[in-house]
């Protein structure tokens, strides 16, 4: 057997990391449900389950580092990506959207 073996007592590394500035740094493989729970929003599902898939769906391509999009009251900015996949995304509430909208 090669590699690390995990059991139920091992600590998982979180793919969602709250930052000091109030944003979240999220691994693109994070399930969209985690965003919904954290921000108390409902994200309509199309053909994606992950944050990376969500961004790809919204943008229509693999976004570059620095690309930003607003959707569902959230601002999402790509922090890491290459020509084939998104790595990390910074997310925060859109301050222009009020709770009544």
Image (spheres, grey):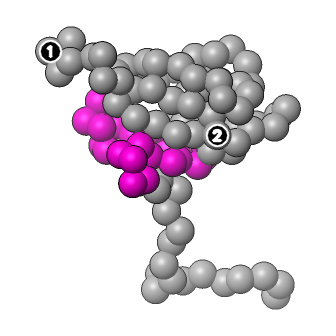
Is residue 26 something one can see in this rendering? Answer: yes
Residue 40 colored in magenta in the image: yes
Quadrant of the image containing the N terminus: bottom right
Q: Quadrant of residue 88?
A: top right
Is 39 positioned to the left or the right of 86 in the image? left
Q: Which residues are magenta?
A: 18-41
Q: Is residue 25 above or below residue 36?
A: below
Q: CA distance from mark 1 to mark 2?
A: 30 Å
Give the image location of residue 3, x and y in percent: 78, 82
**Label 1, on which residue?**
100
Q: Tell me if mark 1 has few (under 14), some (14-19) or many (20+) residues whose alpha carbon lies within 10 angstroms of its own.
A: few
- Kindly state the secondary structure of the residue where label 1 is placed: loop
Give the image location of residue 45, x and y in percent: 46, 24
Q: Nearer the viewer, residue 79 or 35?
A: 79
* Mark nearer the N terminus (1 vs 2): 2
Quadrant of the image containing the C terminus: top left
């Amino acid at each position: 057997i090669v590699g690390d073996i995990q059991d139920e007592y091992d600590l998982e590394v979180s793919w969602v990391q709250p930052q000091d500035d109030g944003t979240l740094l999220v691994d693109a493989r994070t399930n969209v449900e985690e965003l919904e729970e954290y921000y108390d929003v409902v994200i309509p599902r199309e053909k994606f389950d992950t944050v990376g898939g969500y961004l790809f769906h919204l943008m229509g391509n693999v976004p570059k580092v620095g690309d930003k999009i607003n959707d569902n009251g959230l601002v999402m900015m790509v922090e890491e990506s290459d020509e084939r996949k998104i790595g990390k995304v910074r997310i925060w509430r859109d301050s222009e959207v009020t709770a009544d909208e």
